[in-house]
Image: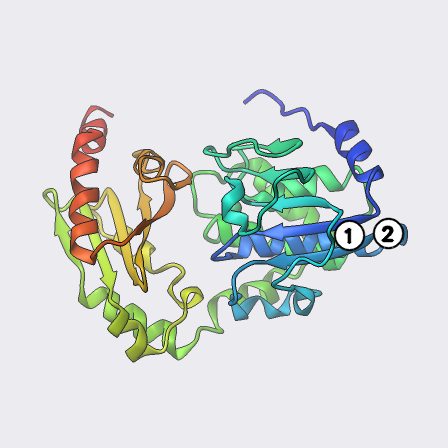
């Protein structure tokens, strides 16, 4: 991999032009967007020349992240009318959930499918998390202390599925080492991810696994939950994070699909072992990474959506790709 050259001067100049800063995290927030946003928020909050806000357009945040420093500061509305937008872990501008027409944006991300909607874009698809991008960028601009390091480490831990994804390499461990050196506590952070699950999250997992289906000679596994399942388990969107990984854990499965029935559409999460499922997501107007992608199909039924996607998998020749490899 050729060394990425961070646009440090451009970012410095951009930050310098704004007194007010709005940090935005994406809809349906995960630990990477929240951890990256809060890491930057902790850093910039110490800059007395700036006023900083952190915002997420969703009504619900993953509650297990409440141990992250300044988590309670996350708002759901933007108050600054004139400010620099810092977008975290977000491939397309509409996933930020606000009308940002005419706004100056610093885009910090690692999605291959990123649409470079920023005025300045710091997008490194080779990096394992948006927090890795943010840490490497901000450590040359500001001191990074234990509070920000905790946020960045939590985001990295989550997006690498506890250091198990194909994006994990020596550099990831070097960043993790630096963050721990600064004061992030691995055991404490891991505890919040693995031992604070809600009863609803286990109940909705049970429903999803009950609906397991295998197709394409077992190479595709599908899981789904209906609106009734969601109501019966009391689950919220954050309770369903990680369910799709269970479908991929099967030995013969290459592509895993998890479908959630929403009020006016179907939310799809895709995972694969090696084939490029972002191709499927992009063809439905979504985005993501090679082995983890997602999108929403409006006004559709569960089974109908799954059938359409299975057809698309065949049309794109994704399973043949696997045969060749
Ligand atoms: Mn991410």
Q: Are marks 1 and 2 in contact (CB under 8 Å)?
A: yes
Residue 173 sits in quarter: top right
Quick check: can you spot residue 109? yes
Name the residue at 32% across, 46% down: 271
Q: From the Cβ of disc 1, is ligand 1 less than 8 Å away?
A: no
* Mark number, residue 47: 2
Above or below, comparing residue 33 to residue 324 in the picture: below
Sort mark 2 into few (<14), some (14-19) or many (20+) by Cα contacts within 10 Å: few
Name the foreground residue: 130 vs 166. Answer: 130
Name the foreground residue: 260 vs 156. Answer: 260
Q: Which residue is mark 1?
A: 43
Regarding mark 2 in the picture, which secondary structure is present there?
A: loop
Image quadrant occupied by the N terminus: top right
Residue 77 x, y percent position in the rendering:
63, 61
Marks 1/2: CA distance? 7 Å
Above or below, comparing residue 66 to residue 309 in the picture: below
């Amino acid at each position: 991999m050729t060394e990425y050259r961070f646009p440090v001067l451009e970012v410095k100049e951009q930050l310098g032009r704004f007194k007010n800063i709005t940090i935005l995290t994406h809809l349906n927030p995960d630990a990477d967007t929240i951890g990256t946003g809060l890491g930057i928020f902790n850093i910039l909050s110490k800059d007395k020349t700036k006023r900083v806000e952190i915002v997420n357009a969703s009504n619900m945040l993953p509650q297990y992240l409440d141990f992250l420093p300044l988590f309670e500061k996350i708002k759901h509305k933007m108050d600054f009318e004139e400010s620099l937008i810092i977008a975290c872990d977000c491939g397309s501008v509409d996933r930020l959930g606000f009308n940002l027409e005419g706004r100056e944006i610093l885009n910090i991300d690692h999605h291959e499918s990123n649409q470079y909607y920023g005025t300045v874009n710091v997008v490194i698809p080779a990096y394992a998390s948006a927090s890795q991008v943010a840490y490497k960028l901000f450590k040359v601009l500001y001191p990074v202390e234990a509070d920000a390091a905790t946020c960045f480490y939590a985001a990295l831990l989550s997006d690498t599925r506890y250091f198990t994804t194909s994006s994990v390499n020596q550099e990831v461990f070097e960043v993790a080492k630096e963050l721990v050196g600064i004061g992030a506590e691995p055991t404490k952070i891991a505890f919040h991810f693995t031992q604070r699950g809600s009863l609803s999250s286990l109940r909705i997992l049970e429903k999803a696994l009950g609906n397991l289906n295998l197709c394409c000679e077992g190479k595709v596994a599908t899981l789904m939950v209906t609106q009734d399942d969601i109501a019966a388990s009391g689950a919220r969107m954050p309770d369903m994070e990680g369910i799709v990984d269970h479908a991929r854990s099967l030995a013969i499965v290459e592509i895993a699909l998890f479908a959630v029935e929403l009020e006016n559409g179907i939310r799809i999460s895709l995972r694969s072992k090696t084939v490029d499922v972002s191709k499927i997501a992009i063809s439905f107007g979504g985005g993501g990474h090679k082995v983890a992608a997602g999108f929403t199909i409006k006004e559709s039924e569960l089974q109908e959506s799954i059938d359409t996607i299975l057809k698309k998998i065949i049309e794109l020749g994704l399973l043949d790709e696997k045969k060749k490899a």
